[in-house]
Amino acid sequence: NDLGLAVANSIAGVAAGARQVECTINGLGERAGNAALEEIVMALYVRNDLMGIGTNINTKEITRTSRLVSRHTGMVVQANKAIVGANAFAHESGIHQDGVLKHRQTYEIMTPESVGLESNRMVLGRHSGRHGFKARIEQLGYALDGDELQRAYERFLAVADKKKEVFDEDLTAILEDEVSDVPEVYRLDYLHCLSGTGVLPSATVRIMINGVPHQESAWGDGPVDAAFNAINKVVGAKVELDRYAIQAVTSGTDAIGGVNLRIRANGHVIGGHGTSTDIVEASAKAFIDALNRLAFLQKRTDRNAATEVHETV
């Protein structure tokens, strides 16, 4: 995609008879990336009258898949990205808004629902019960029970206490934060930061390591750096921050903020993700998420090495 023509070239190839397209979710890849799967699929879907060719892709899973890939790779999707960007179906201009209200197809050649963006968003709040919470997350495609459900519900209540309204995007952020695909060795239990004009930023953290609390304090160039330094003192990890990005999940000053970062350690590059209405807390959670993934990777590497030694003997 060095010239930004990967999708156009792919569509031209299909029109000329090609029946296989090499592409990636969100157009991820080296240098300028690759052809974006979601753009090719929706181009064939929307202009089926011209191409007459379809795919077996479930288009209603495109948005969720895009966000999943973004979360696990740490590569933030730009707001103006076609199909899956935050502004893909946003209309700010007055004439655009009027046109959409009168005849949606005037400015939208596809519907948000066709790529998995539901228009009937349910708004929850601090008085929403556990049953309503569970029903909504099931509608969003999540199946939680027992401890996972209780932990997610408690996190929802904590967010609802800070926000008047909790939207589907907030729920998704909460669930992706709480439901991890790796064992949780480290968990943030407490965070306190001090910063301001003329004040050397400091942070105190308490981390649960396999259920046992450990607390440390540290200074830094800012509250986030101080929090990372304190976490490193607890964990004892030697890691280098490779990438750090912040993205608002919803709008407003009380919005949940999402942090994607990457760390380098022992020759590995590992991503982490965290969310919170407090961006420093979100950063700390993202850092700990990356450390949990590092611990899982190291344990698996050690287990494989031990297996190889046993087989050699």
Image: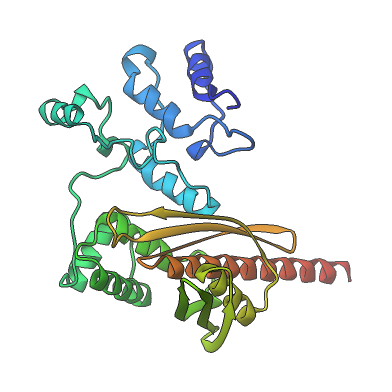
Q: Quick one: quadrant of the C terminus?
A: bottom right
Report the side of 306 relative to 217 (left or right): right
Q: Quadrant of residue 301?
A: bottom right
Depth order, front residue of 96/132: 96
Is 243 situated above or below 3? below
Q: Residue at x 78, y 71 (%)?
A: 306
Is 106 situated above or below 119? above
| Residue 54 percent location from the top left of the image | 39, 24
Report the side of 218 relative to 89 (left or right): right
Report the residue that reaches farthest toward the right: 313
Report the side of 133 relative to 275 (left or right): left
| Residue 122 percent location from the top left of the image | 18, 55
Tell me, yes or no, if residue 216 can be seen here: yes
Q: Residue at x 33, y 73 (%)?
A: 155
Q: Residue at x 28, y 28 (%)?
A: 110
Depth order, front residue of 306/246: 246
Is 30 situated above or below 125? above
Q: Quick one: quadrant of the N terminus?
A: top right
Q: Residue at x 54, y 24 (%)?
A: 6
Q: Quadrant of residue 298?
A: bottom right
Tell me, yes or no, if residue 179 can be seen here: no
